[in-house]
Image (spheres, rainbow, N blue to C red):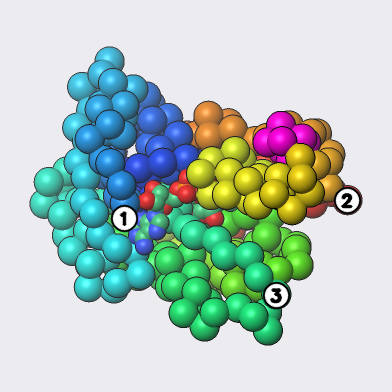
Amino acid sequence: MLRGKTALVTGSTSGIGLGIAQALAQAGANVMLNGFGDHEGPVEQVRQAGAAHGVRVGFHGADMSQPAQIADLLQATTSTLGGCDILVNNAGIQHVSPVEDFPAERWDAIIAINLSSAFHTTRLALPGMKARGWGRIINLASVHGLVASANKSAYVAAKHGLVGLTKAVALENATSGVTVNAICPGWVLTPLVQKQVDARAVADGVDGAEAQRRLLAEKQPSLQFTTPEQLGALAVFLCSDAAANVQGQAWSLDGGWTAQ
Ligand code: NAD
């Protein structure tokens, strides 16, 4: 279905980004990976996911808080894989603290990585998408793009901003063949959330399984984590012809979190 297309997935060495990269490769897209930590394992996993289509997989270690490195990432995607047809803005970090204790440096980093990076990738990828008359921009927002939780001021501000950016860019490009949408997951058990599970276990004096249960029970009525595989399947759907008229949406996959 996506044979001949190239996807750039930011923050794809782990968690949700890696799951989406695998799903896009399985659907036939060539994929440029990005992120910190080991990248050889993820590159191999994505190559295997797309083996039936002979997909090509690249890696670029741009720090998504640095606009010059983001420009280099987009350049490399075009020079090594032929362009960027599908842009998944997924890189993100979290910091949990009351606003009056929130380190200013963490605020700046969260806004840069979770929000401003998507502005930079979008402005750089759009001209090629419009010239080809087809493109998909998928922004990994969060339930926190729609509702708030205490002690996550920077994250909530960035994710609400990302949903706003999604809507504005969707309207600007509504007749261009490019769709722009956000995905809003609830809890997904990735390294980003494992840190919060561990903190909860320590705070409540319980084991990891009980800390997971308590986190889910507080917010996610299904009592199930959303999975990277489910998010990958939604991303593939948003890239399909069936989703060509899905524009400017913030699509929840949150076990009922935002229905409350
Ligand atoms: P994760 O920590 O497993 O993965 C984050 C990825 O981003 C990693 O590949 C990491 O190397 C990369 N990254 C971090 N800082 C970077 C930087 N400066 N430059 C480049 N890459 C960087 O996290 P995850 O849970 O998979 O989160 C992925 C996205 O999904 C984030 O935007 C997050 O806010 C969002 N999200 C996560 C959840 C959840 O419950 N896990 C829920 C809603 C939304």
- Which residue corresponds to the image point at 39% horizontal and 67% vertical from the top-left? 117
- Which residue corresponds to the image point at 12% horizontal and 46% vertical from the top-left? 80
* Sooner in the amino-acid sequence: mark 1 or mark 3: 3
Foreground mark, 3 or 2, reads 3
Front one among 219 and 2: 219
* Sooner in the amino-acid sequence: mark 3 or mark 2: 3
- Would residue 35 be seen by someone viewing this image from the given angle? yes
Real-space Cα distance between discs 1 and 3?
41 Å
Front one among 6 and 151: 151
Mark 2 burial class by Cα count in 10 Å: few <14, some 14-19, many 20+: few
Mark 1 burial class by Cα count in 10 Å: few <14, some 14-19, many 20+: many
- Please check the rendered image and state whether residue 249 is part of the magenta-colored stretch, yes or no: no
> Amino acid under label 3?
Pro
Q: Which residue is mark 1?
A: 129
Count of labels in the image: 3
- Which residue corresponds to the image point at 74% horizontal and 53% vertical from the top-left? 203
Q: Are marks 3 and 2 in contact (CB under 8 Å)?
A: no
Real-space Cα distance between discs 1 and 2?
38 Å
> Amino acid under label 2?
Gln
> Amino acid under label 1?
Met
Q: Which residue is mark 2?
A: 260
- Which residue corresponds to the image point at 23% horizontal and 67% vertical from the top-left? 69
Image coords of residue 213 (percent x, y): 78, 36
Q: Which residue is mark 3?
A: 98
Side of 36 relative to 55 (left or right) = right
Image coords of residue 214 (percent x, y): 80, 42
* Sooner in the amino-acid sequence: mark 1 or mark 2: 1
Mark 3 burial class by Cα count in 10 Å: few <14, some 14-19, many 20+: few
